[in-house]
Amino acid sequence: MGVRALAGKVVVVTGVSRRAGIGFALAEDLLAAGASVLVQSWAEHDAGQPWGADDLGESGVVRLLGGDVRHVVADFADPDAPRRVVEAAVDAFGGVDVVIANHARSSLGTLAEVTAAELDLTWAVNARASILLAQSFAAAHDDTRGGGRIILFTSGQHLGPMSQEIPYAVSKGAIHQMTLTLSDALVDRGITVNTVNPGPVDTGWADPDLAEQVGRALPAGRWGTPADVAKLVRWLASDESQWVTGQVINSEGGFRRWAM
């Protein structure tokens, strides 16, 4: 792919609130490839997690991106938020070509601990918002601009159990299963829908013991990086990926779960 492979494209990237996160790397890479990018963030989620919010704040993180970027703060627990995010991209740039639903609500909880409220919230943010982003994109996309791209994110729950984080695993499983159906709904318009399972990625969330344990199961001797994910997503967002749709792509560096 050329260095300006996405020149003229308008891309929405959700979940861009931390410099160490996948979303920041996606936005940075897409901007370098020539795209105009609207990023969504919701730092309140990070603030409630062990890793915490970025100390630069959401606006500080976005300023570091530079380039042709816009920013929207939105909570995907609100069912109207996906529409507002997509419409903000159209208002800012005159159209939209790619939506990347990178955001996620992280949620621990065993079967004994899980509550209906947490199941509902995690499903709403992770799965429902992904569907509504696809719906809003389909409504806003001008097919004369060429093939559109929707890129979703799942988390390997289809390859190994995640019994300590049931709300998260179930909601990500829904994204895995919706991929083919959403693809079929949009393929006649030249819009592709694919999902990425990025495997273990070092975004600063793992404690030292887990980092070491997982690292031993990765043949390269290291965790994945946000940059590894960004390379795949850039290709999926480009015209070169037009023949690929309805796929869940495992990009895990040969992760040997059984070796943990």
Image (spheres, rainbow, N blue to C red):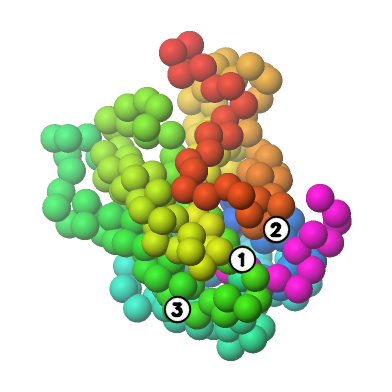
Q: List the residue tagged with mark 2.
A: 239
> Mark 1 or mark 2, which is nearer the start of the sequence?
1
Mark 2 neighbour density, 10 Å: few (under 14) some (14–19) many (20 or more):
some
Is residue 146 on the magenta stretch?
no
- Of residues 257 and 99, which is closer to you in this image? 99
- Tell me, yes or no, whether the two marked residues, 2 and 1, touch with CB atoms within 8 Å: yes
Which residue type carries mark 3? Answer: Ala
- Distance, label 2 to label 1, CA atoms, is 8 Å
Residue 161 lies, in percent from the top left, at: 32, 27
Residue 223 lies, in percent from the top left, at: 62, 29
Q: Which quadrant holds residue 200?
A: top right
Query: What secondary structure is marked by label 2?
Result: helix
Q: Main secondary structure of the magenta part?
A: loop
Q: What residue appears at the point 63 percent right and 78 percent down from the top-left corner?
A: 144
Q: Tell me the magenta residue range.
A: 1-12
Q: Would residue 248 appear left or right of 96 to someone viewing this image?
A: left
